[in-house]
Amino acid sequence: PEAHQAPHPQDAHQPHELARIETKLEELREAERAFTRTHAELAARSDALAERESELALRERAVAAREAPQAPELEELEVRIRRLEQRSRGRTGTAQTFSSGLKALEQRGLRRSD
């Protein structure tokens, strides 16, 4: 009785609709493959760029080490300056740097000469 029902109107469009869906699915799969390839290429380029940046940083440090004067006196002076800056911060509670202290001394000298 129910086995002899008339075909549904949508059934006539099913082969065409199924073909359209399969075509769209294949397009999406191809787009996914292209995305995966692009993602892999970008990752490889990023890795290569990071490696080149690392090599460049090493070369820059090597050049700087060669060009920098080997003056232990300079290192000692920098240590003393940092120590003095730390002491002045502890006393006054303000963070005065060497350069700002030097500027203040210059200004005091200018005021006295007026």
Image: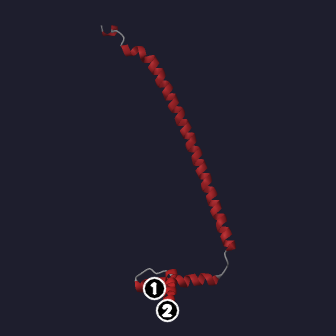
- Crowd tier of the residue under label 1, counting other residues whose Cα lies within 10 Å: few below 14, some 14–19, many 20 or above: some
Q: Give the image quarter of residue 74.
A: bottom right
Residue farthest toward the left in the current orientation of the protein: 1
Q: Amino acid at mark 2?
A: Arg
Q: Estimate the x, y position of residue 5 in percent, counting from the top left.
A: 33, 9
Question: Which image quadrant: the N terminus?
Answer: top left
CA gap, disc 2 to disc 1?
A: 24 Å
Q: Is residue 83 visible?
A: no
Q: Estimate the x, y position of residue 100 in percent, counting from the top left.
A: 49, 81
Residue farthest toward the right in the current orientation of the protein: 66
- Crowd tier of the residue under label 2, counting other residues whose Cα lies within 10 Å: few below 14, some 14–19, many 20 or above: few
On screen, residue 41 above or below 85: above
Q: Could you tell me which residue is drawn at 41 percent across and 85 percent down?
A: 92
Q: Is residue 72 visible?
A: yes
Q: Give the image quarter of residue 58.
A: bottom right
Where residue 112 is drawn, which disc sits there?
2
Which element carries disc 2, helix, strand or loop? helix
Q: Earlier in the sequence, mark 2 or mark 1?
A: 1
On screen, residue 55 above or below 86: above
Give the labeled residue for mark 1.
88
Q: Estimate the x, y position of residue 72 in percent, counting from the top left.
A: 64, 82
Tag 2–tag 1 contact (CB < 8 Å): no
**Looking at this view, is 48 or 69 the one in front?**
69
